[in-house]
Image (tube, rainbow, N blue to C red):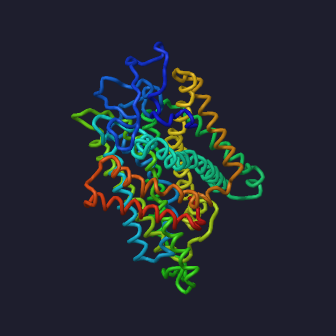
Amino acid sequence: MFGQYSSEESPLHNLHVDTDQSPPTTTLQIITITSGTQGSGDCRHDDDDEINPVDAWLPITESRNGNFFTCVFHLLSSGIGFQALLLPLAFSILGWTCGIICLLLASTWQFYTIWLLVHLHEALPGPRCSRFLQLSIASFGPKLGKLLAIFPVMYLSGGTCVILIITGGRTVELFYDTLCGRGASCDAKSMTGTEWFLVFTCVAIVLAQRPNLNSIAGVSFIAAITAVGYYTLIWVSTISKDRPNRVSHDPLQNGKSDMATIPAIFNALGIIALSFRGHNLVLEIQGTLPSSSKHPSSKSMWRGVLLSYLIIAMCIFPLAIAGFWAHGNKIPTKVGNTSIFLQFYSQNVSKSVKSLAYILALINCLSSFQIYAMPVFDNFELRYISIKKKRCSRWVRTGLRLLFGGLAFLVAVAFPFLPSLASLIGGMALPLTFAYPSFMWISIKKPRRNGFMWCFNLGLGCLGFERHSGNSCSVDFSY
Protein backbone atom coordinates (compact mmCIF):
# COMPACT_ATOMS: atom_id res chain seq x y z
CA MET A 1 0.00 0.00 0.00
CA PHE A 2 2.94 2.29 0.65
CA GLY A 3 5.11 0.90 -2.06
CA GLN A 4 4.81 4.10 -4.09
CA TYR A 5 6.64 6.10 -1.43
CA SER A 6 10.19 6.74 -2.60
CA SER A 7 12.97 6.37 -0.10
CA GLU A 8 14.24 9.80 -1.07
CA GLU A 9 11.05 11.78 -1.59
CA SER A 10 7.97 12.45 0.43
CA PRO A 11 4.67 10.95 -0.75
CA LEU A 12 2.34 13.06 -2.86
CA HIS A 13 5.18 15.20 -4.24
CA ASN A 14 6.60 12.70 -6.68
CA LEU A 15 3.45 12.27 -8.75
CA HIS A 16 3.14 13.64 -12.28
CA VAL A 17 -0.47 14.33 -13.08
CA ASP A 18 -2.41 15.28 -16.18
CA THR A 19 -3.06 18.98 -16.30
CA ASP A 20 -6.64 18.45 -17.42
CA GLN A 21 -7.28 16.53 -14.20
CA SER A 22 -5.55 18.97 -11.90
CA PRO A 23 -7.18 21.44 -9.53
CA PRO A 24 -6.63 25.16 -10.25
CA THR A 25 -3.03 25.19 -9.01
CA THR A 26 -0.94 22.57 -10.80
CA THR A 27 2.70 23.29 -9.98
CA LEU A 28 4.46 20.43 -8.25
CA GLN A 29 7.54 20.60 -6.13
CA ILE A 30 9.74 17.70 -5.12
CA ILE A 31 10.81 17.95 -1.51
CA THR A 32 13.61 15.81 -0.14
CA ILE A 33 13.10 14.67 3.42
CA THR A 34 15.78 14.72 6.06
CA SER A 35 15.25 14.36 9.75
CA GLY A 36 14.20 17.70 11.20
CA THR A 37 15.01 19.56 7.96
CA GLN A 38 13.01 22.63 7.05
CA GLY A 39 10.40 21.83 4.45
CA SER A 40 10.41 18.10 5.18
CA GLY A 41 7.44 15.82 4.82
CA ASP A 42 4.34 16.09 2.73
CA CYS A 43 3.56 19.37 4.30
CA ARG A 44 2.45 22.70 2.97
CA HIS A 45 1.02 25.95 4.22
CA ASP A 46 -2.13 27.45 2.82
CA ASP A 47 -0.26 30.71 2.14
CA ASP A 48 2.39 28.99 0.01
CA ASP A 49 2.45 29.85 -3.67
CA GLU A 50 3.10 26.28 -4.70
CA ILE A 51 0.43 23.84 -3.53
CA ASN A 52 0.48 20.15 -4.20
CA PRO A 53 -2.71 19.45 -6.18
CA VAL A 54 -2.84 15.82 -5.04
CA ASP A 55 -3.78 17.01 -1.54
CA ALA A 56 -7.08 18.18 -3.03
CA TRP A 57 -7.72 14.71 -4.45
CA LEU A 58 -7.43 12.62 -1.28
CA PRO A 59 -10.20 12.11 1.31
CA ILE A 60 -8.32 13.47 4.31
CA THR A 61 -7.19 16.76 2.75
CA GLU A 62 -9.81 17.16 0.02
CA SER A 63 -11.69 19.69 2.13
CA ARG A 64 -10.11 22.09 4.62
CA ASN A 65 -13.31 23.86 5.59
CA GLY A 66 -13.61 22.35 9.05
CA ASN A 67 -14.14 24.38 12.20
CA PHE A 68 -14.04 24.12 15.97
CA PHE A 69 -17.28 22.12 16.15
CA THR A 70 -16.37 19.56 13.47
CA CYS A 71 -13.01 19.14 15.20
CA VAL A 72 -14.76 18.36 18.51
CA PHE A 73 -17.12 15.88 16.83
CA HIS A 74 -14.24 14.01 15.16
CA LEU A 75 -12.17 13.91 18.34
CA LEU A 76 -15.07 12.53 20.38
CA SER A 77 -15.91 9.97 17.70
CA SER A 78 -12.33 8.70 17.59
CA GLY A 79 -11.57 9.09 21.30
CA ILE A 80 -14.44 7.21 22.99
CA GLY A 81 -14.69 3.51 22.35
CA PHE A 82 -15.67 0.12 23.71
CA GLN A 83 -12.24 -0.55 25.18
CA ALA A 84 -12.89 1.81 28.12
CA LEU A 85 -15.63 -0.55 29.33
CA LEU A 86 -12.82 -2.70 30.72
CA LEU A 87 -11.56 -0.01 33.13
CA PRO A 88 -13.47 -1.42 36.15
CA LEU A 89 -11.62 -4.67 35.53
CA ALA A 90 -8.30 -2.80 35.74
CA PHE A 91 -9.44 -1.23 39.02
CA SER A 92 -10.35 -4.67 40.37
CA ILE A 93 -6.73 -5.72 39.81
CA LEU A 94 -5.04 -2.55 41.06
CA GLY A 95 -7.46 -1.42 43.77
CA TRP A 96 -8.94 2.02 44.38
CA THR A 97 -5.80 4.07 45.01
CA CYS A 98 -3.50 2.60 42.38
CA GLY A 99 -6.31 2.41 39.84
CA ILE A 100 -7.25 6.08 40.11
CA ILE A 101 -3.61 7.21 40.16
CA CYS A 102 -2.71 5.15 37.09
CA LEU A 103 -5.78 6.37 35.21
CA LEU A 104 -4.94 10.01 36.04
CA LEU A 105 -1.32 9.56 34.99
CA ALA A 106 -2.25 7.83 31.74
CA SER A 107 -4.83 10.48 30.85
CA THR A 108 -2.38 13.31 31.61
CA TRP A 109 0.35 11.60 29.61
CA GLN A 110 -1.76 11.04 26.50
CA PHE A 111 -3.18 14.58 26.83
CA TYR A 112 0.37 15.95 26.73
CA THR A 113 1.33 13.88 23.68
CA ILE A 114 -1.77 15.19 21.88
CA TRP A 115 -0.55 18.71 22.66
CA LEU A 116 2.76 17.78 21.04
CA LEU A 117 1.07 16.44 17.90
CA VAL A 118 -1.17 19.50 17.55
CA HIS A 119 1.82 21.83 17.66
CA LEU A 120 3.96 19.64 15.41
CA HIS A 121 1.32 19.80 12.67
CA GLU A 122 2.79 23.13 11.54
CA ALA A 123 6.06 23.06 13.45
CA LEU A 124 8.39 23.93 10.59
CA PRO A 125 8.22 27.29 8.78
CA GLY A 126 5.16 26.95 6.58
CA PRO A 127 4.50 23.20 6.31
CA ARG A 128 1.48 21.19 7.41
CA CYS A 129 1.72 17.49 8.13
CA SER A 130 -1.80 16.16 7.77
CA ARG A 131 -1.03 12.47 8.30
CA PHE A 132 0.79 10.69 11.11
CA LEU A 133 2.97 8.82 8.63
CA GLN A 134 4.13 12.08 7.07
CA LEU A 135 5.10 13.53 10.44
CA SER A 136 6.97 10.33 11.25
CA ILE A 137 8.89 10.57 7.98
CA ALA A 138 9.62 14.26 8.58
CA SER A 139 10.90 13.44 12.07
CA PHE A 140 12.88 10.24 11.59
CA GLY A 141 13.65 10.16 7.88
CA PRO A 142 12.01 8.15 5.07
CA LYS A 143 13.14 4.64 5.97
CA LEU A 144 12.94 4.72 9.76
CA GLY A 145 9.82 6.91 9.73
CA LYS A 146 7.87 4.46 7.56
CA LEU A 147 9.18 1.48 9.51
CA LEU A 148 8.03 2.94 12.82
CA ALA A 149 4.66 4.32 11.74
CA ILE A 150 3.15 2.12 9.02
CA PHE A 151 2.16 -0.85 11.19
CA PRO A 152 0.61 1.01 14.17
CA VAL A 153 -1.23 3.47 11.92
CA MET A 154 -2.65 0.81 9.62
CA TYR A 155 -3.46 -1.55 12.48
CA LEU A 156 -5.23 1.14 14.47
CA SER A 157 -7.25 2.11 11.40
CA GLY A 158 -8.01 -1.15 9.59
CA GLY A 159 -7.81 -3.29 12.72
CA THR A 160 -10.22 -1.08 14.61
CA CYS A 161 -12.69 -1.31 11.73
CA VAL A 162 -12.51 -5.12 11.89
CA ILE A 163 -13.08 -5.08 15.64
CA LEU A 164 -15.99 -2.68 15.18
CA ILE A 165 -17.55 -5.18 12.74
CA ILE A 166 -17.19 -8.00 15.29
CA THR A 167 -18.38 -5.89 18.22
CA GLY A 168 -21.14 -4.22 16.24
CA GLY A 169 -22.36 -7.52 14.81
CA ARG A 170 -22.59 -9.09 18.24
CA THR A 171 -24.29 -5.99 19.63
CA VAL A 172 -26.93 -6.29 16.89
CA GLU A 173 -27.45 -9.89 17.99
CA LEU A 174 -27.80 -8.84 21.63
CA PHE A 175 -30.31 -6.19 20.63
CA TYR A 176 -32.31 -8.73 18.63
CA ASP A 177 -32.29 -11.24 21.48
CA THR A 178 -33.43 -8.56 23.93
CA LEU A 179 -36.37 -7.57 21.76
CA CYS A 180 -37.26 -11.16 20.90
CA GLY A 181 -37.01 -12.49 24.43
CA ARG A 182 -34.69 -15.46 23.79
CA GLY A 183 -37.56 -17.92 23.29
CA ALA A 184 -37.50 -21.03 21.14
CA SER A 185 -39.17 -19.25 18.23
CA CYS A 186 -36.71 -16.36 18.65
CA ASP A 187 -33.70 -18.67 18.45
CA ALA A 188 -35.13 -20.39 15.38
CA LYS A 189 -35.41 -17.08 13.49
CA SER A 190 -32.08 -15.66 14.63
CA MET A 191 -29.20 -15.36 12.17
CA THR A 192 -25.71 -16.74 12.61
CA GLY A 193 -22.81 -14.64 13.82
CA THR A 194 -21.42 -14.36 10.28
CA GLU A 195 -24.75 -13.07 9.01
CA TRP A 196 -24.87 -10.42 11.73
CA PHE A 197 -21.34 -9.35 10.75
CA LEU A 198 -22.48 -9.06 7.13
CA VAL A 199 -25.48 -6.92 8.08
CA PHE A 200 -23.28 -4.55 10.06
CA THR A 201 -20.65 -4.37 7.30
CA CYS A 202 -23.20 -3.60 4.59
CA VAL A 203 -24.70 -0.74 6.58
CA ALA A 204 -21.26 0.61 7.48
CA ILE A 205 -20.04 0.61 3.86
CA VAL A 206 -23.22 2.31 2.65
CA LEU A 207 -22.58 5.07 5.19
CA ALA A 208 -18.91 5.20 4.13
CA GLN A 209 -19.66 6.74 0.73
CA ARG A 210 -19.20 10.30 1.95
CA PRO A 211 -16.32 11.80 -0.06
CA ASN A 212 -13.91 13.09 2.59
CA LEU A 213 -13.14 13.40 6.27
CA ASN A 214 -14.69 16.84 6.58
CA SER A 215 -17.96 15.62 5.06
CA ILE A 216 -18.55 13.02 7.80
CA ALA A 217 -18.70 15.63 10.57
CA GLY A 218 -22.40 14.90 10.99
CA VAL A 219 -21.69 11.19 11.33
CA SER A 220 -19.01 11.96 13.93
CA PHE A 221 -21.54 14.11 15.79
CA ILE A 222 -23.89 11.12 15.97
CA ALA A 223 -21.00 8.92 17.13
CA ALA A 224 -20.14 11.42 19.87
CA ILE A 225 -23.74 11.74 21.10
CA THR A 226 -24.31 7.98 21.18
CA ALA A 227 -20.98 7.26 22.90
CA VAL A 228 -21.65 9.81 25.63
CA GLY A 229 -25.21 8.47 25.82
CA TYR A 230 -24.45 4.79 26.41
CA TYR A 231 -21.50 5.50 28.72
CA THR A 232 -23.69 7.77 30.84
CA LEU A 233 -26.55 5.28 30.73
CA ILE A 234 -24.27 2.49 31.95
CA TRP A 235 -22.73 4.28 34.94
CA VAL A 236 -25.98 5.98 35.99
CA SER A 237 -27.91 2.69 35.88
CA THR A 238 -25.02 1.02 37.71
CA ILE A 239 -25.10 3.32 40.74
CA SER A 240 -28.91 3.46 40.81
CA LYS A 241 -29.37 -0.25 41.51
CA ASP A 242 -28.36 -2.38 44.48
CA ARG A 243 -24.92 -3.90 44.50
CA PRO A 244 -24.54 -7.71 44.37
CA ASN A 245 -23.97 -9.51 47.66
CA ARG A 246 -20.46 -10.07 48.96
CA VAL A 247 -18.82 -7.56 46.64
CA SER A 248 -15.17 -7.05 47.55
CA HIS A 249 -12.95 -4.16 46.52
CA ASP A 250 -9.69 -5.84 47.48
CA PRO A 251 -7.28 -6.14 44.54
CA LEU A 252 -7.65 -9.49 42.82
CA GLN A 253 -3.91 -10.16 42.93
CA ASN A 254 -3.84 -10.05 46.75
CA GLY A 255 -2.74 -13.38 48.09
CA LYS A 256 -1.23 -14.49 44.80
CA SER A 257 2.42 -15.27 44.24
CA ASP A 258 4.75 -12.70 42.72
CA MET A 259 4.82 -14.67 39.48
CA ALA A 260 1.04 -14.29 39.16
CA THR A 261 0.87 -10.72 40.47
CA ILE A 262 3.25 -9.12 37.99
CA PRO A 263 1.40 -10.26 34.82
CA ALA A 264 -1.92 -9.22 36.39
CA ILE A 265 -0.59 -5.72 37.07
CA PHE A 266 0.75 -5.46 33.52
CA ASN A 267 -2.65 -6.54 32.24
CA ALA A 268 -4.34 -3.79 34.27
CA LEU A 269 -1.88 -1.16 33.04
CA GLY A 270 -2.45 -2.36 29.49
CA ILE A 271 -6.21 -1.93 29.87
CA ILE A 272 -5.74 1.62 31.17
CA ALA A 273 -3.30 2.51 28.40
CA LEU A 274 -5.60 1.12 25.70
CA SER A 275 -8.61 2.98 27.06
CA PHE A 276 -7.28 6.03 25.22
CA ARG A 277 -7.31 5.97 21.45
CA GLY A 278 -7.39 8.29 18.45
CA HIS A 279 -3.78 9.51 18.34
CA ASN A 280 -3.42 8.12 14.82
CA LEU A 281 -6.20 10.52 13.73
CA VAL A 282 -5.21 13.75 15.50
CA LEU A 283 -3.13 15.10 12.61
CA GLU A 284 -5.74 14.01 10.07
CA ILE A 285 -8.49 15.83 11.96
CA GLN A 286 -6.36 18.95 12.22
CA GLY A 287 -5.73 18.67 8.48
CA THR A 288 -9.42 19.42 7.85
CA LEU A 289 -9.07 22.87 9.44
CA PRO A 290 -8.14 25.97 7.44
CA SER A 291 -4.84 27.55 8.36
CA SER A 292 -2.83 30.68 7.61
CA SER A 293 0.14 32.47 9.10
CA LYS A 294 -2.22 34.75 11.04
CA HIS A 295 -4.67 32.07 12.09
CA PRO A 296 -2.85 28.71 12.44
CA SER A 297 -4.96 25.59 12.74
CA SER A 298 -3.34 24.73 16.08
CA LYS A 299 -5.46 27.33 17.90
CA SER A 300 -8.82 25.93 16.83
CA MET A 301 -7.55 22.38 17.15
CA TRP A 302 -6.31 22.84 20.70
CA ARG A 303 -9.58 24.42 21.81
CA GLY A 304 -11.35 21.42 20.30
CA VAL A 305 -9.00 19.04 22.14
CA LEU A 306 -9.67 20.75 25.48
CA LEU A 307 -13.44 20.48 25.15
CA SER A 308 -13.53 16.98 23.68
CA TYR A 309 -11.18 15.45 26.23
CA LEU A 310 -13.05 17.10 29.07
CA ILE A 311 -16.15 15.28 27.81
CA ILE A 312 -14.20 12.05 27.37
CA ALA A 313 -12.93 12.29 30.96
CA MET A 314 -16.52 12.87 32.15
CA CYS A 315 -17.45 9.57 30.49
CA ILE A 316 -14.46 7.41 31.35
CA PHE A 317 -13.79 8.29 35.00
CA PRO A 318 -17.39 7.85 36.28
CA LEU A 319 -17.67 4.55 34.42
CA ALA A 320 -14.43 3.21 35.91
CA ILE A 321 -15.26 4.34 39.44
CA ALA A 322 -18.96 3.44 39.40
CA GLY A 323 -18.34 0.09 37.70
CA PHE A 324 -15.75 -0.97 40.27
CA TRP A 325 -17.84 0.35 43.18
CA ALA A 326 -20.87 -1.63 42.06
CA HIS A 327 -19.28 -4.88 40.91
CA GLY A 328 -15.84 -5.08 42.54
CA ASN A 329 -14.46 -8.61 42.26
CA LYS A 330 -17.62 -9.80 40.42
CA ILE A 331 -16.44 -8.29 37.14
CA PRO A 332 -15.67 -10.97 34.50
CA THR A 333 -11.92 -11.41 34.11
CA LYS A 334 -11.67 -13.18 30.76
CA VAL A 335 -13.94 -12.39 27.86
CA GLY A 336 -13.78 -12.75 24.10
CA ASN A 337 -15.48 -9.50 23.17
CA THR A 338 -16.25 -6.17 24.79
CA SER A 339 -19.93 -6.60 23.94
CA ILE A 340 -19.97 -9.10 26.83
CA PHE A 341 -19.05 -6.23 29.16
CA LEU A 342 -21.88 -4.19 27.71
CA GLN A 343 -24.17 -7.13 28.42
CA PHE A 344 -22.74 -7.50 31.93
CA TYR A 345 -23.31 -3.85 32.84
CA SER A 346 -26.85 -4.03 31.43
CA GLN A 347 -27.94 -6.96 33.56
CA ASN A 348 -30.70 -6.43 36.12
CA VAL A 349 -32.05 -3.37 34.30
CA SER A 350 -35.34 -3.00 32.51
CA LYS A 351 -35.74 -4.27 28.98
CA SER A 352 -36.18 -0.75 27.65
CA VAL A 353 -32.96 0.53 29.26
CA LYS A 354 -31.04 -2.50 28.03
CA SER A 355 -32.39 -2.06 24.50
CA LEU A 356 -31.50 1.63 24.54
CA ALA A 357 -27.93 0.85 25.63
CA TYR A 358 -27.53 -1.69 22.83
CA ILE A 359 -28.94 0.57 20.13
CA LEU A 360 -26.76 3.51 21.22
CA ALA A 361 -23.68 1.27 21.22
CA LEU A 362 -24.59 -0.10 17.80
CA ILE A 363 -25.03 3.37 16.27
CA ASN A 364 -21.73 4.41 17.81
CA CYS A 365 -19.95 1.44 16.21
CA LEU A 366 -21.42 2.27 12.79
CA SER A 367 -20.46 5.93 13.11
CA SER A 368 -16.96 5.35 14.50
CA PHE A 369 -16.29 2.95 11.62
CA GLN A 370 -16.41 5.94 9.25
CA ILE A 371 -13.63 8.01 10.80
CA TYR A 372 -11.32 5.02 11.38
CA ALA A 373 -11.80 3.81 7.81
CA MET A 374 -10.93 7.20 6.31
CA PRO A 375 -7.10 6.80 6.57
CA VAL A 376 -7.42 3.43 4.80
CA PHE A 377 -9.53 5.01 2.05
CA ASP A 378 -6.94 7.76 1.78
CA ASN A 379 -4.12 5.27 1.25
CA PHE A 380 -6.12 3.22 -1.25
CA GLU A 381 -6.78 6.32 -3.33
CA LEU A 382 -3.16 7.45 -3.07
CA ARG A 383 -2.12 4.09 -4.50
CA TYR A 384 -4.59 4.48 -7.36
CA ILE A 385 -3.44 8.05 -8.12
CA SER A 386 0.21 7.02 -8.15
CA ILE A 387 -0.58 4.40 -10.82
CA LYS A 388 -3.16 6.19 -12.95
CA LYS A 389 -1.80 9.76 -12.52
CA LYS A 390 -5.33 11.09 -12.21
CA ARG A 391 -8.02 11.70 -9.65
CA CYS A 392 -10.27 8.86 -8.48
CA SER A 393 -13.66 8.96 -10.15
CA ARG A 394 -16.80 8.50 -8.09
CA TRP A 395 -17.13 4.87 -9.19
CA VAL A 396 -13.49 4.06 -8.47
CA ARG A 397 -13.81 5.59 -5.02
CA THR A 398 -16.95 3.54 -4.37
CA GLY A 399 -15.24 0.37 -5.60
CA LEU A 400 -12.21 0.91 -3.34
CA ARG A 401 -14.46 1.35 -0.32
CA LEU A 402 -16.44 -1.75 -1.18
CA LEU A 403 -13.14 -3.60 -1.48
CA PHE A 404 -12.07 -2.48 1.98
CA GLY A 405 -15.45 -3.44 3.44
CA GLY A 406 -15.17 -6.90 1.91
CA LEU A 407 -11.63 -7.40 3.21
CA ALA A 408 -12.58 -6.23 6.72
CA PHE A 409 -15.59 -8.56 6.71
CA LEU A 410 -13.47 -11.53 5.64
CA VAL A 411 -10.96 -10.85 8.42
CA ALA A 412 -13.79 -10.54 10.95
CA VAL A 413 -15.25 -13.88 9.85
CA ALA A 414 -11.87 -15.62 9.74
CA PHE A 415 -10.76 -14.27 13.13
CA PRO A 416 -13.88 -13.72 15.26
CA PHE A 417 -11.65 -14.04 18.34
CA LEU A 418 -9.62 -11.00 17.28
CA PRO A 419 -11.02 -8.70 20.02
CA SER A 420 -9.61 -11.03 22.67
CA LEU A 421 -6.15 -10.53 21.14
CA ALA A 422 -6.51 -6.88 20.29
CA SER A 423 -5.00 -5.70 23.57
CA LEU A 424 -1.97 -7.89 22.94
CA ILE A 425 -1.57 -6.64 19.38
CA GLY A 426 -2.68 -3.14 20.32
CA GLY A 427 0.10 -3.03 22.89
CA MET A 428 2.49 -3.04 19.94
CA ALA A 429 0.90 0.26 18.84
CA LEU A 430 1.18 1.96 22.24
CA PRO A 431 4.39 3.85 21.30
CA LEU A 432 2.30 5.79 18.78
CA THR A 433 0.41 7.27 21.75
CA PHE A 434 3.02 7.43 24.49
CA ALA A 435 6.47 7.51 22.83
CA TYR A 436 6.60 8.74 19.23
CA PRO A 437 5.26 12.27 19.83
CA SER A 438 8.00 12.97 22.38
CA PHE A 439 10.75 11.82 20.02
CA MET A 440 9.15 13.76 17.16
CA TRP A 441 9.23 16.91 19.28
CA ILE A 442 12.94 16.45 19.96
CA SER A 443 13.70 15.77 16.28
CA ILE A 444 11.74 18.70 14.84
CA LYS A 445 11.82 21.35 17.59
CA LYS A 446 15.41 20.54 18.56
CA PRO A 447 15.27 21.82 22.16
CA ARG A 448 18.52 22.57 23.95
CA ARG A 449 20.37 19.34 24.61
CA ASN A 450 20.15 18.30 28.28
CA GLY A 451 17.61 21.08 28.85
CA PHE A 452 14.29 20.48 30.58
CA MET A 453 12.18 19.86 27.45
CA TRP A 454 14.88 17.64 25.94
CA CYS A 455 15.25 15.50 29.07
CA PHE A 456 11.50 15.45 29.78
CA ASN A 457 10.50 14.29 26.31
CA LEU A 458 13.37 11.84 26.08
CA GLY A 459 12.34 10.33 29.40
CA LEU A 460 8.69 10.10 28.39
CA GLY A 461 9.61 8.54 25.06
CA CYS A 462 11.83 5.91 26.65
CA LEU A 463 9.22 5.22 29.32
CA GLY A 464 6.61 4.82 26.58
CA PHE A 465 8.67 2.11 24.91
CA GLU A 466 9.28 0.48 28.30
CA ARG A 467 5.55 0.51 28.97
CA HIS A 468 4.94 -0.93 25.51
CA SER A 469 7.29 -3.85 26.09
CA GLY A 470 5.64 -4.62 29.43
CA ASN A 471 2.02 -4.27 28.32
CA SER A 472 2.44 -6.44 25.27
CA CYS A 473 3.54 -9.41 27.34
CA SER A 474 0.33 -11.19 28.20
CA VAL A 475 -2.73 -8.97 27.99
CA ASP A 476 -5.65 -11.33 27.47
CA PHE A 477 -8.58 -8.96 27.49
CA SER A 478 -10.80 -7.39 24.86
CA TYR A 479 -9.78 -4.32 22.91
| Left or right of residue 306, residue 262 in this image | right
Q: Which residue lies furthest to the bottom in this view?
A: 255
**Residue for point 57% across, 35% down:** 3
Residue 66 placed where, x, y %?
36, 35
Q: Considering depth in this image, is 214 or 135 the residue closer to the camera? A: 135
Q: In this view, does 78 lie above or below 376?
A: below
**Can you say whether 303 is above or below 267 in the image?**
above
467 is higher (above) or lower (below) than 3? below
Residue shown at 30% from the left, 40% from the top: 124
Q: Quadrant of the N terminus?
A: top right
Q: x and y percent of residue 442 in the render?
A: 33, 52
Q: Which of 84 and 266 is in front in this view?
A: 266
Q: Which of 448 and 221 is in front in this view?
A: 448
**What x and y, as percent, mark residue 296?**
27, 38
Q: Residue at x 54, y 24 (%)?
A: 392
Left or right side of 405 for 301: left
Q: Say how many tags the image has.
A: 0
Q: Would residue 57 appear left or right of 176 to someone viewing this image?
A: left
**Residue 333 sits in quarter:** bottom right
Q: Quadrant of the C terminus?
A: bottom right
Q: Position of 292 compared to 79: left or right?
A: left
- Residue at the far left in the pictured view: 294
Residue 237 image point, x, y percent:
48, 65
